[in-house]
Image: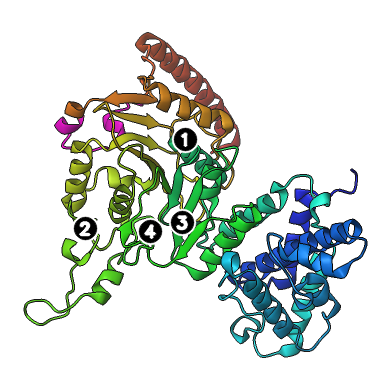
Amino acid sequence: MWNMTTKADIERVLWSACDSFRGKIDSSRYKDYILSMLFVKYLSDVSKEKRQEYMRQYENDERRVERAMSRERFTMDGESTFDFLYENRTATDIGQKINVALSHIEDHNSSKLRGVFRAIDFNSQVDFGEDVRAKNATLRNLLEDFNGIDLRPSQLGSADIIGDAYEYMISNFASDAGKKGGEFFTPSQVSELVARLVNPQENDRIYDPTCGSGGLLLKAYKKVPNGKVAVYGQELNAQTWALCTMNMFLHNVDDAKIWQGDTLSNPQNIENDEWMTFQVVVANPPFSLDKWDSGFLSNAGLDAKGKKQEKMTATLDPWRRFDWGVPPASKGDYAFVLHMLKCLDANNGRMAIVLPHGVLFRGASEGKIRQQIVELNLLDAVIGLPANLFYGTGIPACILVFRKNRTRRDVLFIDVSGDGNYEKGKNQNILRDIDLEKIVDAYNSRENIDKYSYVASYDEIKDNDFNLNIPRYVDTFEEEELVDIDEVKTNITSIEAELAEVQAHMKKYLDELGI
């Protein structure tokens, strides 16, 4: 077992590959090249090992081996393999050869991997510049970096190693200094918490309308040991959509449906002209998205005065998601909430969404939407998280949990931001396993815990004008110790005596010096 490939081995190769690019291409771009090459290497090694097994089984009968290989989870031709690319690493057209390989992989596996490499070009002049020799040297280094790692399933300690290394890599790009990577990665412990709160069950349909690289979906999927759930997601960014599709494939979630496009103005969760609903909905949408309505307005017709419509209205949405109110154009948080509530199964729908704290107390149209959500008894819990948990932003976030068919009208508030409820990190704070357990236990038991959780009645929330700001419900005020005045007076007298003694010594020295 000593020579098994570990997650650390893979991470070492990935960082070595990063070194091949650093200083030449921005890290937010070169991640696509490295993760794509990791994907190709993994597919190649899996395919190579399968072929060797069949060759032994069918005693080198090529025809039978080919037939068996064609029934495998994916197929690769000779010019798509990593070994072929590595052998040609010094070719002057190596960039084109890699592009052809990626194109063949898509063509041969179109039901699972169609379009997954469309946003990447190993011949890109934008990324590599016009110096062909420099580009070829970089690509040769990349192939040599990956040649040193064995990703055959028999050499991997567990099936999750490759997927976990993939997510590790994405997380490191997300935390890269100054990079706005948080948009495609939710920290693992936050994803884990969200998954536990919605508690997926066998035969559930799980959906994330802003799925990024798929971390939230995968955490929810793994909560059902036999994998008997259906996974759906949508992502706007084409590169991130590709990462998500590869990520699902690497975690053996072959039947996941990941759509690409704007979830708000172009929702893809439509089946036979009917709106699809889901038992479990999870999401970490972009915080307070500005111009979230641009997709609607660009398709809007002329108003009564013959002018292009400039303001979003509920009637612009054919699916009637904004009948309770249209969120402000500068803050898309409730646009995503309303979309997700529309997606929630009427009988057993559970949903958890990560949002900025502003959604709890901002007024105007957001206040009206919030009031209707509470009045219709959809909000189940509000959980305030510590600051500095997320990549790219230090602001604290909260998780709102919603449920359809609730039998109670109260709302649970949990405040995790206090000392001792998380681990303070140098660059980033962390929720530990013990912290997650405490949150989930408090959510399930719905008890009042001093300075931590509070069950607020509907009337209390109504009396607060439907303001959900957590400090209104969870009192975290720490009383200061009573001051002993007599002790303070004694200390002052003692200090004054010491000061007089020092001043006397000083005068003596100054007199001696004649000053």
Q: Which residue is mark 4?
A: 269
Pick whichever of labels 1 and 3 is earlier in the sequence.
1
For the question of whether residue 379 can be seen, the reply is yes
Secondary element at tag 2 = loop
| For the residues bearing labels 2 and 3, Cβ distance under 8 angstroms | no
Nearer the observer: mark 4 or 3; the answer is 4
Kindly indicate the quadrant of the structure image that contains residue 38: bottom right
* Identity of the residue drawn at 66% across and 52% down: 163
Q: Marks 1 and 3, Cα distance to the nearest angstrom? A: 18 Å
Residue type highlighted by circle 4? Asn
Residue type highlighted by circle 2? Arg
Q: Which residue is mark 3?
A: 233
Residue type highlighted by circle 3? Gly
Q: Pick whichever, 9 or 49, lies toward us.
A: 49
Residue 427 screen position, x and y as percent:
57, 48
Secondary element at tag 4 = loop
* Identity of the residue drawn at 70% across and 85% down: 96
Pick whichever of labels 4 and 3 is earlier in the sequence.
3
For the question of whether residue 24 can be seen, the reply is no
Q: Marks 4 and 3, Cα distance to the nearest angstrom? A: 9 Å
Residue 441 screen position, x and y as percent:
46, 24
Residue 91 belongs to magenta span: no
Q: Which residue is mark 1?
A: 199
Q: Residues within 10 Å of mark 1 (few under 14, many from 20)?
A: some
